[in-house]
Image (cartoon, rainbow, N blue to C red):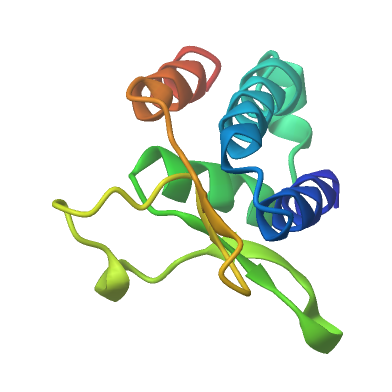
Amino acid sequence: KTLYAILRLAVKIGEAGMENALIKCSSFIESWMLDVGLRDAATISDLEPDCLLLICSLAAGLPITLREGPAKGVGAASVSNWSEQDDCGIATLPEKAGIIPRSSCLNLALLRKLIIYS
């Protein structure tokens, strides 16, 4: 729910045309995942399976997608839409709000946290 709220805020920022602010959203999301969601072994073991799958998918390079409607929430994008040449960012926001960029070290940082505490 927290990640969904952060991404909805990013959509509003992107729609307002503040693309530089999406970079700040990127830093916020990355810090939240690493420092809150993957803080230590106990925190990781308390993650819901869907959230852990989402973080593992993000670590593998897939972007996050927002689902709207009755099944609103977040999920990992499909592997079939992924390309090594495309910079998919952390998330491609709906309604042409933009892309939340991904730092070059996010994948390794997520994998390191998951491996160390598993």
The answer to which quarter of the image holds residue 15 is: bottom right
Find residue 47 and report its horizontal and vertical position in percent.
74, 39
The residue lying toward the viewer, choosing from 16 and 105, is: 16
Find residue 87 and report its horizontal and vertical position in percent.
29, 48
Residue at 76% from the left image edge and 21% from the top image edge? 36
Left or right of residue 104, residue 59 in this image: right
Seen as rendered, the residue at the extreme left is: 85
Seen as rendered, the residue at the extreme bottom is: 70
Asked if residue 34 is positioned above or below residue 78 in the image, the reply reads: above
Residue at 47% from the left image edge and 26% from the top image edge? 110
Left or right of residue 42, residue 76 in this image: left
The residue lying toward the viewer, choosing from 90 and 80, is: 90
Residue at 65% from the left image edge and 20% from the top image edge? 31
Asked if residue 32 is positioned above or below residue 102 in the image, the reply reads: above
Left or right of residue 83, residue 29 in this image: right
Left or right of residue 90, residue 61 in this image: left
Number of residue marks? 0
Residue at 32% from the left image edge and 24% from the top image edge? 104
Find residue 40 and report its horizontal and vertical position in percent.
68, 13
Find residue 73 and report its horizontal and vertical position in percent.
76, 67
